[in-house]
Image (spheres, coloured by chain):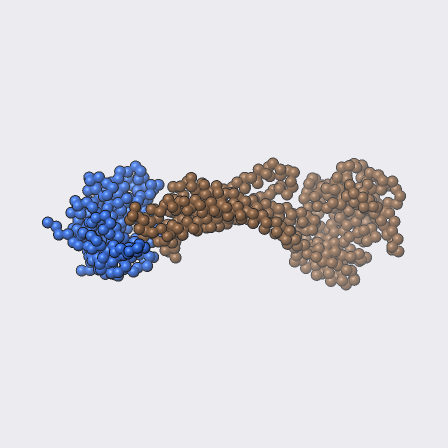
Chain colours: A blue, B brown
Amino acid sequence: MTALIELTGITKVLKGQKQPRTILDGVDLSVSAGESVAIVGRSGSGKSTLLSVLGLFDRPDAGQYLLAGRDISRLPERHAAKLRSSHFGFVFQRFFLLKHLTAAQNVAMALVNGQGWLPRRDRRARILQALEQVGIAHLAKTRPARMSGGEQQRVAIARALVRQPQVLLADEPTGALDTETGVVVIEALLAATERGCGLILVTHDRDHAARMGRTLDLADGVLTERVRA
Amino acid sequence: MRRLSGRFRAALIIGVQGIRARKVRTLLSMVSLFLGVFAVVVVQAGASIAERALLADLELTAGIDGTKRMDVMPHEQAPAIVLDTVRGRSDSVATLAVSAIIGEPGVRPVNEGASPLDQSWGPSQVCNSAGVCEPLQGNAPVGAAVEVRLTAMTGDIRTFRPLRLRSGRWLDFTTMPSMAPRLVLNLEAAKGFTRHQVPAEMRVGGASANLTPQFVGVVDDGDMQPRAYVRLDEMTTWLPPASLADPNAGAELQVLLSASTPAEQVLTSRLQGIGAQTYLSTVDSRKQQRDELALMRLVFLSMAGLVLLIGAAGILNVGLATVGERVEEFALRRAVGTPRSLLAGIVLAETLLTGLLTAAAAIGVSVAGLKVVVALVGESQPFLQGVQFPWQAGLAGIIAGLVAGVVGGFVPALRAAGIPIATVMRA
């Protein structure tokens, strides 16, 4: 069976300094549909860079990136944007909700992005479904300022899920939340994997990492699988 | 096409959301742009109104654009041929102008030679066939009488020259001719009869008797000479057309024709047949006044353009500041798949909508301002009467608003499109 994501020998070098610094050094990674993977590592170890490459924000300097068997290592920006819209969902440490928009309008941001046009009724149905998936449909018309941190992050997750992505990339999604709220957010993310969505979670939190199917360590640009006891 | 439509809608939706979210900034942009768009609208409206006023004045004296004017040189048989050709036609009017003295009997007029009331051109003269001329009124004393140019018409001259009725009524060409000729005076003639109110008698060279005229109205014909308009058939009761066209009495024969009337060719052929000379000219008032206004408009529009540029710089300034504040929003939008072109489109949509809103405000203020000006000084300024806000000014305002929106939004749009997506990762 073809892996959803297949990275082979991915290398990323940080240029523009006196000495070029290798951030990712021949990273190999394979993620299947419905699988959840945690990536842990110290600050500056390259976790966010790896996520940038995975999310097509950045291109690798070397190596191959296959998405469902298709080589997307050197994709032009125009096509990358289309793939980001259709295949990926992103959740960040900060929620990046627009304060002047309601929860529903913030979720709609991923639908009104110039990548195809959905009629208003379909759009509304999709938004409500996404908000229901994370348990905050009742907050659809509420603005972020009137929500708790956990609720705001769940709106961000709903925004990531509304296009029914194949891969969910989460960069420290619980970093700005208390433990209890963090658990709720992780559960919302794991719920997506039950619908066949692959989840790659970058985290510092060992407990959250332990709840993922696999945990990978990134150190000095090298990714290694952590063997669980 | 469908994709473009989707992006266009997305840009509009997000643009409107952006404007609603930043009302104060939008207002600031509008304030900086308002003066520029307003200047363009005012210059365009002023030019259109001035053009209209100038055109109206030119049409009043020269005739409506496209009218053909045929001056027929004195010839014994010419009046009969002209009157025969234009009889019953609505596309041509013949006018015969002679001097007439109206007022106290047996006196010389106060304005000999039908000069303007406050000027003196010397006495009218009558010349015999040997070329010997003598004053029309001999050595009679000056009395309460006014000399006018009497224009006798075969039809309604207003088809070709839009004379403005000031009081009373215009001549009715559908009724039976009156034995007492009905006259419509121009403003200068009316001024004379306001000064000299005496029982009127009208003396015309060659008439079988002195006539008793009826004044029925006053028009503005743009003429500085005292003039009276009369139906030709009310004059021919008292004197033959040939007398009305007597060159020795300073008579003039003229035909006004519409652009495409066949009467012109018939008339030319028949007059050439008897050896009468004709001079044909076409009224081109619009071109004449357009040339006069073009330079003036260019100068004012250049100044307005400069103000508009300053307004666009205001939009640019506010736009750049706004994009700087929204770096994370744009980076996030890129992260969720929004193409760079749409990000640029969102910023441009916002500045274009701001430009359009400003244009609407400037047009609204201009319309209201014009109404106020018309209400305040319209009575004393005839060219303002019945004036409407010119649609060209509205169009110019909208175009100015859109151009300022594009000029002011272009650089912020490029900057928004170039925001690195990794911004959200580093936040």
Is residue B353 at all visible to an observer of this figure? Answer: no
Direction from residue B292 to residue B424 in the image, left or right:
left
**Which residue appears at 21% of the width and 53% of the height?**
A220
Is residue B116 at all visible to an observer of this figure? Answer: yes
Image quarter of residue B106: top right
> Viewer-proximal residue, B175 or B99?
B99
Residue B375 location, x and y as percent?
Answer: 59, 37
> Viewer-proximal residue, A20 or B70?
A20
Query: Quadrant location of the N terminus of chain B?
Result: bottom left
**Which residue appears at 62% of the width and 42% of the height?**
B384
**Where is B85 relative to B104, above or below?**
below
**Which residue appears at 79% of the width and 43% of the height?**
B119
Direction from residue B276 to residue B11 in the image, left or right:
left
**Which residue appears at 68% of the width and 42% of the height?**
B165
Of all residues shown, which one is farthest toward the front? A18
Residue B338 location, x and y as percent?
Answer: 34, 52
| Total labels drawn | 0
Image quarter of residue B282: bottom right
> Viewer-proximal residue, B70 or A75?
A75
Direction from residue B72 to residue A211 in the image, left or right:
left
Residue A6 location, x and y as percent?
Answer: 21, 58
